[in-house]
């Protein structure tokens, strides 16, 4: 009895065929979304086939703003290979994720009147600093040489409470510059050989002045 060909056995030609159950997706609220897709491919040259169908940086069809970051393959039959495709980005119709938070910051000061405890010669304590992180995918290379106070945020920044040190107001103040919302970290990930940039903007709110 003749051995069936790969096309007859697997039921496909040279177009990649998604393996049944060959999808693993992870949505992250703190980072990039990731996906793993497993495809069968009928070819005598798997390296060229991978470059043609799963090129690094190519957008994954039906997966929104997610892009191929790596691929590996293994022989699964006569001229049939199983391609393991890794993708990363943001799943959805808009390539932007916003995370709002806050972090405790310490301070120390000389003579000050505390809301509880009255006048003291020195004090140290904590205050809450608002934070906001944007993550997005772009096919236009970002501009890097922008001062933190001059960068335009990728989305809307949240409203913040007034300066917590105004009641009572300290005698001596230390002024912050820049102040307001400041982009203190601008990080860009690239995919080799592709015009795709994955950007993380980290914004912190700095009050105009602190107790001195």
Image (tube, grey):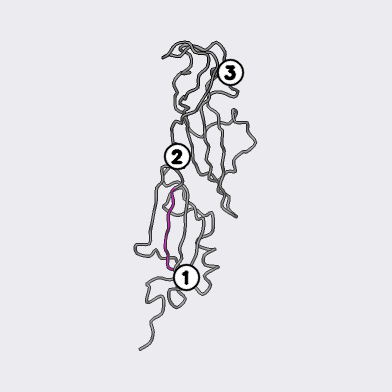
- Please determine whether, in this image, residue 45 is positioned above or below residue 196: below
Q: Residue 54: give x, y in percent of width and height.
A: 50, 60
- Badge 2 crowding class, 10 Å Cα cut-off, few under 14, some 14 to 19, many 20 or more, is many
Q: Which residues are magenta?
A: 33-41
The residue carrying mark 2 is 97
The mark nearer the N terminus, 1 or 3, is 1
- Please determine whether, in this image, residue 88 is positioned above or below residue 9: above
* Quadrant housing the N terminus: bottom left
Whether residue 52 appears in magenta in the rendering, the answer is: no
The Cα–Cα distance between marks 1 and 3, rounded to whole angstroms, is: 63 Å
The Cα–Cα distance between marks 2 and 3, rounded to whole angstroms, is: 34 Å
Residue nearest the observer in this picture, 106 or 84:
106
The Cα–Cα distance between marks 1 and 2, rounded to whole angstroms, is: 35 Å
Label 1 with label 3: CB-CB less than 8 Å: no
Question: In terms of secondary structure, where does tag 1 sit?
Answer: strand
* Quadrant housing the C terminus: top right
Residue nearest the observer in this picture, 54 or 74:
74
**Would residue 33 be found to the left or right of residue 55 on screen?**
left
Q: Nearer the viewer, mark 2 or mark 3?
A: 3
The residue carrying mark 1 is 74
- Badge 3 crowding class, 10 Å Cα cut-off, few under 14, some 14 to 19, many 20 or more, is few
The residue carrying mark 3 is 174
- Badge 1 crowding class, 10 Å Cα cut-off, few under 14, some 14 to 19, many 20 or more, is few
Task: Give the main secondary structure, helix, strand or loop, of the magenta stretch.
Answer: strand
Residue nearest the observer in this picture, 1 or 83:
83
């Amino acid at each position: 009895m003749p051995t069936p060909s790969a096309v007859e056995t697997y039921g496909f030609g040279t177009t990649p065929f998604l393996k049944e159950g060959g999808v693993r997706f992870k949505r992250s609220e703190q980072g990039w979304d990731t996906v793993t897709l497993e495809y069968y491919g009928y070819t005598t040259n798997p390296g060229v086939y991978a470059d043609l169908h799963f090129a690094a940086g190519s957008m994954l069809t039906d997966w929104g703003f997610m892009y191929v970051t790596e691929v590996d393959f293994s022989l699964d039959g006569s001229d049939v290979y199983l391609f393991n495709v890794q993708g990363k980005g943001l799943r959805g119709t808009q390539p932007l994720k916003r995370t709002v938070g806050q972090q405790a910051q310490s301070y120390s000061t000389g003579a000050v009147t505390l809301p509880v405890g009255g006048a003291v010669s020195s004090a140290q304590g904590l205050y809450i600093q608002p934070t906001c992180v944007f993550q997005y995918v772009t096919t236009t290379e970002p501009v890097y040489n922008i001062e933190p106070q001059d960068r335009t945020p990728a989305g809307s920044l949240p409203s913040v409470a007034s300066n917590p040190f105004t009641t009572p107001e300290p005698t001596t103040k230390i002024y912050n510059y820049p102040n307001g919302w400041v982009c203190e970290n601008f990080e860009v990930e690239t995919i080799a050989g592709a015009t795709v940039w994955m950007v993380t903007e980290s914004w912190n709110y700095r009050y105009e002045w602190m107790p001195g």
